[in-house]
Amino acid sequence: MCYFISKQIQIKRLLCKGRKGRGLTCTIELVQVGYSRAWLTAGASADTEVTALGLYQDGFVFRLCFCTGNTNVCYFFFFFKQKMPCVKEFKRLSSFFLAILSFFTFQGARCELLVFPAGPSLVNALAGENVTLAVSFSGASDPVVSWFKGVLSIVVWTINSSADPSVAAIFSSVIKLEKQSASLTFFNVPLNYTGDYTIEMVKPGMRKASTTFTLKIFEYIQSLTLSSQPGLIKEGTENFTLQHSMLQGVFEQQIWFFNGIEIKNSSHYLVKTQANSLVILRPNQNDTGEYAVLLTNPFRNATASQNVSVRYGPDEPTLEVHPIQSFYLAGDSLNLSCQANGFPQPVAEWVFGGKIISQKGVLNLANVQTSQGGVYTCRLVNEDTKESRQKNMNLTVYERPVGNPECLVQSVNAINLQYHCGWVGGTPQAQLSFPELSNSSSGAGNFSLTVNASDSLNGKTIQCMAEHPVEQNKCNITASSPVAFLPIMRTTVDSGGKIVVTICCFSKASPKAVVSWFSGNETVINGSIYQISSNTSQLMIRHYNVSNFLLQNYTCTCRNPLGSKKREIQLQGPSISDSSLFPNQNGTIVTLTWEVPSMSVVTGFDIQMKGPDLLSKNRNGPLTKSSSNVYRTIQQKPGSARSTDIFFLDPKLTYWFQVIPKARMTNGEPSKIHRIGPGHQPRYPVPRPVDKVKNSQPNITANNMLKGALKSPPDYNRLQKTLSEKSVSLPAFIPPPPTRLATTV
């Protein structure tokens, strides 16, 4: 039930929240023509039964009443124009309002605690002036008042308290609390006091009331000027900045203009309010003109302008050749011309091979040779702006490519074949193609063509056709799947004492086959035990215990897009597959040879003997007269050895020999036992040529020397000479062949 009509003051909105009988709060928004709007708030207590609501006006007084049964609770709001009425009228209204307030004192005690601006909540002021944040409050007597700047408490006081307000020390010289109204007054307010100020009122038993002001402090704008950076503006620079500055002042808004038209942020203009600047991005000759800035605040406006000239040029060069041909032959004559717009007119120079060959716009070339073919660069320079621009022209003179075409085939993603053909050099580059693979694809200089691998391409020769204006040529390439292969294995011991087994799988294929490794059903990956070479063809397995090498079956698969070949590898413990013993004619020296299975893990061999001790090298008899029936180790050989020589045997005595294969500390089964001595018919090896005869016996120690004066053993070198003079061909001592890592089939 609200109605109000006035030419000067209008009710814009009346908003009530709550429910009858549960408390009701109403807010009125008033608008006076020519002045800012104001909000007025009032409410009924929570235990009030509101039966009706009415709003009434009497001049500048607004009355908001809550009907609560037989009692009316009314709130009065006073609204004055900014220009105060005459004194007589003011006194009359004041006495009238005082009477009304006195009449409704009792009712007001039942109100909520309310505080609201007595004027605008946004307050603008000049630095150095006095300004008051005026408030009004109702609904409670002697509330506690607190003022805050942001979250910082600056004043605390209890209304009608005899004590002085408590003011923060840093604000004490500037602010004062008005005791009658609780308003906040600033004296000679500084610029840095701009901010939000909040008043809070608290009364026990009532809800806290608060309202916030925004205070903005300004200065008059003085001596506004514009400056530019850089001073000389050139077309194509990264950006150009106009910045304003002033002797003093605070502005609220800045507006930039170009030739009288307001500038907005865009892809070409960037207005930086915080930096007081305007940035012209990538300026060009069209940005020449007058720029101005307008600064405003609630107290004064200021304008500054500056004329800007953008230097430009040279523009994009234009290159021409006469006569116009797609290529030239040795002995032809031609000329190249270069020009571009700019101010002043750009100066041209021609560059070839990194050297300046002319500083004229036209370059004449007579009797051109193939060495003059290539890229010619015309560089244009604006001598005022020092800006330059260049453009290239390729002059083609025929020249045969170097050598002959070369072909190869590669694997792509392990599923496709990429045929490649190259014929480098020459002008122009040779055109390359694979007609058997594609009739529509070709390339210049280097050409690759990727196709799906298929059985039809396995073993098929593909031809690359290379065509050049001077000569036609070709090359061939054949792709093939991996062929059957045998793995190669070798065993070593590393510096840490670990057994290192290296398995190599290589299969001839085109493209080159990639090897994948498996241990049982699991893929082998690099780690502390396994290490795969960079070309994937070798697998190194490391471990202290030989038994760990024998637990798994290893598999290597050589694969390219045309197929694959797989081999399973079962490592064996240390073992000997075959052995032989070959004595010399006199029976004083024997050569013991042995073979090892290709996948046997062997790091060394113990050469063992049973029987009497060997003769001393320097004495004529045995070390002892007794013979031994126990095998003892007389030599130790590395894992790569396949033979050894044993010197100083007594041909009248019988000896037994065997070889013990070892994988570090683990012994394998001994070889078969070889006997030499009286009554034994030795096997002689097939004679083979020899370059040099060994004349030293390794591993001879003092323990093997004879104790007594016996006949010295025969001289082996003399023995060989004597044997060579015999009419009957007998086996000669032959040094062991070079060490073989494995047997390849």
Image: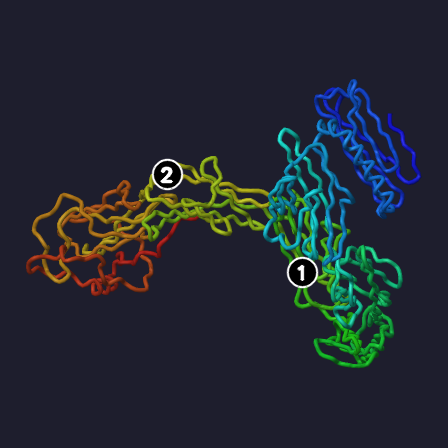
Labels 2 and 1: the sequence-earlier one: 1
| 347 relative to 639 in the view: left or right | right
* Residue 506 vertical placement versus 201 (above, below): below
* Relative height, residue 484 to residue 701 (above, below): above
Q: Is residue 462 left or right of residue 515?
A: right
Q: Nearer the viewer, residue 731 or 305?
A: 305
What residue would you read off at disc 2?
550
Q: Residue at x 6, y 60 (%)?
A: 709
Residue 534, position as x, y percentages in the image: 50, 52
Colour mode? rainbow
Q: Are marks 2 and 1 in contact (CB under 8 Å)?
A: no
Observer-nearest of 81 and 37: 81
Q: Is residue 11 above or below residue 255?
A: above
The residue carrying mark 1 is 422
- Residue 710 location, quadrant: bottom left
Element type where label 1 sits in the image: strand
The secondary structure type at the circle numbered 2 is: helix
In this view, which residue lies farthest toward the right?
7
Check disc 2: other Cα within 10 Å, few if <14, some if 14-19, many if 20+. Answer: some
Any part of residue 745 in sight: no
Q: Is residue 636 visible?
A: yes
Measuring from the top left, give residue 117's x and y in whole percent.
75, 41
Q: Which mark is residue 194?
A: none
Instruction: Give amino acid for label 1.
Output: Gly
Location of residue 316 by image quarter: bottom right
Residue in the picture at 82% in, 55% down: 264
Q: Residue furthest left?
A: 708
Q: Amino acid at mark 2?
A: Leu
Q: Horizontal and vertical percent for residue 160?
A: 65, 39
